[in-house]
Amino acid sequence: MKRKVGALEKIEADHAALRFKIKRDPQSYRDDFNNQWQQYETLRDLFLQSPSTQGTGLADLKDLVEFVSHVADLYPDLCAQFPSDLQQILLQHHEVLEYELRDKMVGSLCLLRNKDVIDSVALLNTLFPVLVATPSKSLRQLLFTKILSDLRSSNVKTTNHKLNRTVQTVLYNLLESDKESPKGIWAVKITRELWKKQIWTDARAVEVMRLAALSENEKVIAGGVRFFLGGDKEREEAAEESSDDDNVDMAKLKHQAGINKKTKKKARDLKKAAATVKRKEKKKNAPHPLNFSALHLLHDPQGFAENLFSKHVQNTKAKLQLETKLLVLQLVSRLVGLHKLTVLSLYSYFLKHLTPRQASVTSYLACLAQATHSYVPPDVLEPLVQKIANEFVSEASASEVAAAGLNAIREICVRQPLAMTDTLLQDLVMYRKSKDKGVMMAAKGLLSLYREVGAELLHKRDRGKDASMGIRAGTIKEQRYGEEAAGGIEGIELLEAWKEDERRKKRIAAGLDPDGTDGDSQLDEAEDWKKWELESDSDSDEEGWINVESDGEDINISDSEDEDKGKPKAKKAKLDSATPAPNEGSKSAEPETAAAKQAQISKLLTTTILTPADLKQLKALQEQTAINAHLPSHKRAAMLAARHADEAITAETIEAAASLGKKNTKEEKIAMAKADRETNHQSTTAKRKAKKESEGKSTTNKEKARKKNFLMTLGKAKSKNKRSLGDVKKTLQGHIERSKRGGKRGNKGN
Amino acid sequence: MTTSSKKKKDKKKDFQKPKLRVGKAAPKAANATSTSFKAKSISLKQQALSAIAPTLEAQCVHHLGLLDHKADKQRQESLAFLTSAITGITPGTPLPQPASVIIPAVQRLILDPSNAVRQQLLKLLKILPENDVATHADQLLLHTRAGMTHLSVQIRTFALEVLQWLVRVAGDEVVSCAGGWVKMLKCFLSLLIWKSEGEGKWSQAKSYGKSDAKLQVKQMDALTAFLRAGLYHAQVVSISNDSNFPLWQTEHHMLSERSNVYAHLNLFSATRDEEAEMFEDREDRQRVFNDRAEPAVVTGLEQALKAGGEMGRAAAQLRKVVRDGMADFHREEIIV
């Protein structure tokens, strides 16, 4: 409905031009602005008499609103009322406003915020109620992006705690005030987005989501639960994306700048690229921001898990879809597994749903496995395992079902090995003779698991070499419920041996008795402290920095030299194993030295502080001696260790075994082989040529000559042969001259 | 140039002219869009089949709707139709559409960018019955004020014409409606760039949209008319009490014939500040004028008088009105 303005009229008077002039000299144009302000006031009054009009006056008002908001910061005394006007109109009439005017008003408010005429709190207090209340989808979209961008921009330099707290409180109150309304979805959306961008990383944001997960609207519940299940992963991915989206090759750019035409724009680009590289470098050196996952930031996870479970899953009145219910169940089981909570009613709930006919039963199985941890009483889990075995694993059931059942049992038993009885285990292990590959592999997995964690439950012939030897020697003991292994550092004995070796070498070099225990052990300690930092900073030395050794010598926390009994023990250990590195393998064969070793480890850990250099050495030693890391059992253990405790078990994990035996079709195989390969290979030159041709650009003379028809060149070639000597000379000389001059026309400038 | 004959052929294909043959349908262009569609049934909207021409009222409604049309010509013609329809009716019969419908529809055309439309609008306004205009004076005044501060000089000039007409037709309503007095005074002062000595700047900034002397003269004329309406005594209708002898001053106790009599109580809308307040008494208006505008007007007049010529004459007129209008107010002050 925009009316066209005549060209002449436009030249004479137009808001854009006036705005431009006002910006350059606000004082001189004050009267003109005043006129426009009055015009705005009049139009506003007119508009307020019937805010829902769609008439022609709105275009003028829209223009004026834009104009005033652009220059409002220059006349704060005249426009004091302007922001509150806009806020009032938006809050009161947003439902009936003409959409262009409405969007313009939102934009103007944001502009005023950017010009610091109003503060973020005022802006958000206007936008948020409208966002929640408006029926218009496009307006919601607009407001959502505006709110997010404002929150982001006000958190750029430093975290704006005050604003964040205000907004979080608003969101919290929104969720709390009406638990059944779908409006809460906006709180969820905003929080999730800000979490993803790492603007909100605190417990308050998590608290908002906790409330959302406990609300009564299905959408809001799903939003809150999804946040806990996937929010952190999303955040990580976003961070990775943002870090590798602008990889600038500085060397290449500099090289190009040397060759290509030098323009101001290119110089600017180069400078910008250099700045980004520098910033990135700085970021790389900065300490990694410590971001806790949402699941760890929860207050009272026990209460939350219980609430969730009883409210949404157990409650028969909760009318949630199966999908949502499963999501909630996943979250509950995740919480239980991660924080080792005790929600006993959860397990009896599972008992009801563990049948092959249950929809998406693999998710249930995964949830059950996830909810298992070492503090779950085995007698609670036993009937569950029994039920899975009965329902899923039988000769009569389909091979996929049996494989899934076995796999689920294995996943449960990884977390709580005591949930298994020997008769059941022996039955299940028999399935390793199954003809189906999936079932066979799953059964084997169970077998190898129990070889490690509970070999006594197996038949003697199934135990394997390591386990039966261990049982005979008494090193493998039955695990009790609630037992915790004493903590230690893996490979610490290697480090100990290595240190001893070094010391001996040094003493030999100094001409002392290598096994002596006199005086200079303090020297060693001092040496260690000197090497506090790693040698990795050698590259920074090139920049002319002088390395000043810190006076680490006088920080002497260790008091080993005062204790006389410390050293001899270490010596004994060294005498036992003259070659420090490969003695790992023989360790288990010598049970009589085990006790001594135990003492030695605890000694090193309790008497010294490991420096970063020590830790590096330890890692290197571990890698050196990792001979048996290639054995399959160790590989498996490593894989298990690599799987982070925070990661979830999904239905795919359970289903994986069943898919083992499946054969791909031919099409799938072909597609897999082709996966990420170019269909038709072309050289870069060919590509460039093709591009040039498609753009319709001309060819060089050389190219033309190369492509010239052979027959056409014949005549010239013949006549060239018939030239006289003088002619030949002239041509050759001409050629030389031209090359000296630099082409036919020559280099005029030089 | 390529040697490949295939490529040459391909290239040629692009530039081949399609052959046209007599009696055959022309080949479709490459970018032709098929507009055909399939439908199970096609329903035609009802067509007007009556032979009777629409009534004048219906036509007027139609043309009122066309006032939003995007073509200048159409708007102007619609206005012209309405004008002729109103002039055409025999005196005594009601308008084809009531004024309460016409005025809200046409009033926003005061800000219309096309000059022809605006002139036609003024013609239409002038033939409307005066008492109908009076009831819509506040709305019209709002639009007029919007026009007076418009960016375009032509619209500003036109708005002054409308204001003069409005003051002539319904002067009392104009000066006493909500915001009619203070806001108008403020508007005039900012248009004329008249400031009282205290807030005066060193130099007068040249206004942005060409505010030439002619426009200023017109503005001063309009201000003169406006002040005359606001500051002079209203024409007192001679009250003859003879007819109903035992009752005295009955008309003061009767219900007023004006619409929205209690508007000044402001019962239903947002609270008003002083600017938007209604000033129904002449004394109130005098007081406000004295507070807010008189010093600025006096200083402005001094300068305008010095300019002489047409502007000087207009200024003299204005000064006379101000003096006459404020005479008794100042006398009272002196006495008090």
Image (cartoon, rainbow, N blue to C red):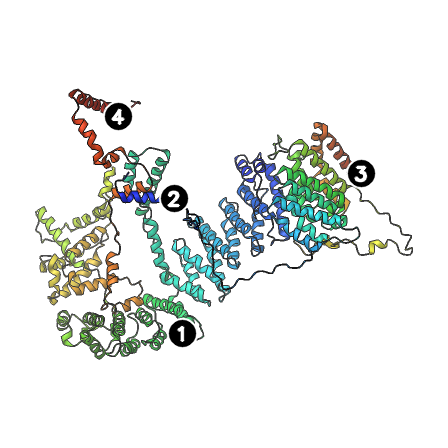
Kindly report the distance in space between the C-alpha atoms of the residues bearing marks 3 and 4: 101 Å
Q: How many marks?
A: 4
What residue did someone put label 4 on? A743
Q: Which mark is residue B17?
A: 2
The answer to whether residue A738 is left or right of residue B288 is left
Could you tell me residue B189's position as x and y percent? 67, 38
> Could you tell me the amino acid type at mark 2?
Lys
Residue neighbourhood size for the residue with mark 3, other residues' Cα within 10 Å, grouped as few (<14), some (14–19), many (≥20): few
Q: Nearer the viewer, mark 1 or mark 3?
A: 1
Q: Chain of mark 3?
A: B
The residue beneath circle 3 is B331
Q: Residues within 10 Å of mark 2 (few under 14, many from 20)?
A: few
Residue B303 percent location from the top left of the image: 69, 30
Please name which of the two marks, 3 or 2, marks the residue nearer to the observer.
2
Can you give x and y, in whole percent of width and height, for residue A475 in the image? 16, 70
> x, y percentage for residue B137?
72, 48
Is the residue A722 above or below the residue A624 in the image?
above
Q: Which residue is mark 1?
A: A314
Circles 2 and 1, Cβ within 8 Å, touching? The answer is: no
How far apart are the alpha carbons under marks 2 and 4?
Answer: 44 Å
Label 1 – label 3 distance at C-alpha: 89 Å
Residue B275 visible in rendering: no
| Earlier sequence position, callout 3 versus callout 2 | 2
Q: Are marks 4 and 1 on the same chain?
A: yes
Does the residue at mark 1 contact the one at mark 3 (Cβ under 8 Å)? Answer: no
Q: Secondary structure at mark 3?
A: helix
Per the image, label 2 sits on a secondary structure element best described as: loop
Q: Which image quarter: residue B169?
A: top right
Q: CA distance from mark 3 to mark 2?
A: 97 Å
With A387 as the anchor, is B287 left or right in this view?
right
Label 1: chain? A
